[in-house]
Amino acid sequence: MRLGHFVAAAVTVLAVAGSGATRPADDEAIQGTWEVVGISDNGEKAPPEKFKGARMVITKDKLTILADGKTQSTGTYKLTAAARPRQIDLRVEEKHLKGIYDLRGDSLRLCFNENPGGPRPTAFESKKGSENDQLFELTRAKK
């Protein structure tokens, strides 16, 4: 392959990969209403009846947790999409919770250290006796 063809091909690949046209920024993509479809805490999966009707409503700058249509708590959040795994910092009721998130289309996973100010989780898992034992699985609510 001639150098000119190689450079043209590389520029095309980089332009398509870096365009972001098919994927909005996480700050925008995370906004919406999310239904809780799974919760694990301290290494144990909660039975579905424990979180039936639980939702998270995420706006540009606020996260609201609802159960049976009633607000349970509200807070603010900040995403760091450049980190790997991606990071989320949540402030709820004067508590600062460090977490990680995985956002793929209409699926969202959140893993938090339940101890305010504790270390940030490094994996999406819930282990018995672990500080990063709260794992939430959500799906975007249908309109």
Image (tube, rainbow, N blue to C red):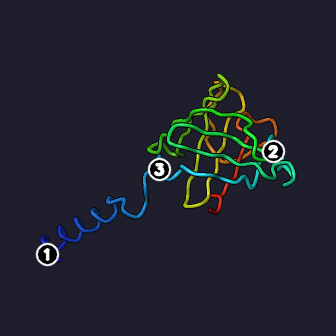
- What's the amino acid at mark 1? Arg
Residue 69 in the image: state x and y as whole percent.
75, 46
Q: Which residue is mark 1?
A: 2
The quadrant holding residue 127 is top right
Element carrying mark 2 = loop
Q: Earlier in the sequence, mark 2 or mark 1?
A: 1
Can you say whether 3 is above or below 24 in the image? below
Q: Quadrant of the C terminus?
A: bottom right
- What's the amino acid at mark 2? Gly
Residue 115 in the image: state x and y as whole percent.
71, 27
State how far apart marks 3 and 1 are (Cα): 42 Å
Residue 73 in the image: state x and y as whole percent.
70, 34
Within-10-Å neighbours for mark 2: few <14, some 14–19, many 20+: some
Indicate left or right for 25 with 116 as reference: left
Q: Which residue is mark 2?
A: 43
State how far apart marks 2 and 1 are (Cα): 57 Å
Image disc number at residue 54? none
Q: Which residue is mark 3?
A: 28
Q: Are marks 3 and 1 in contact (CB under 8 Å)?
A: no
Mark 2 vs mark 1: give the one in front. Answer: 2
Indicate left or right for 40 with 82 as reference: right
Within-10-Å neighbours for mark 3: few <14, some 14–19, many 20+: few
Element carrying mark 1 = loop
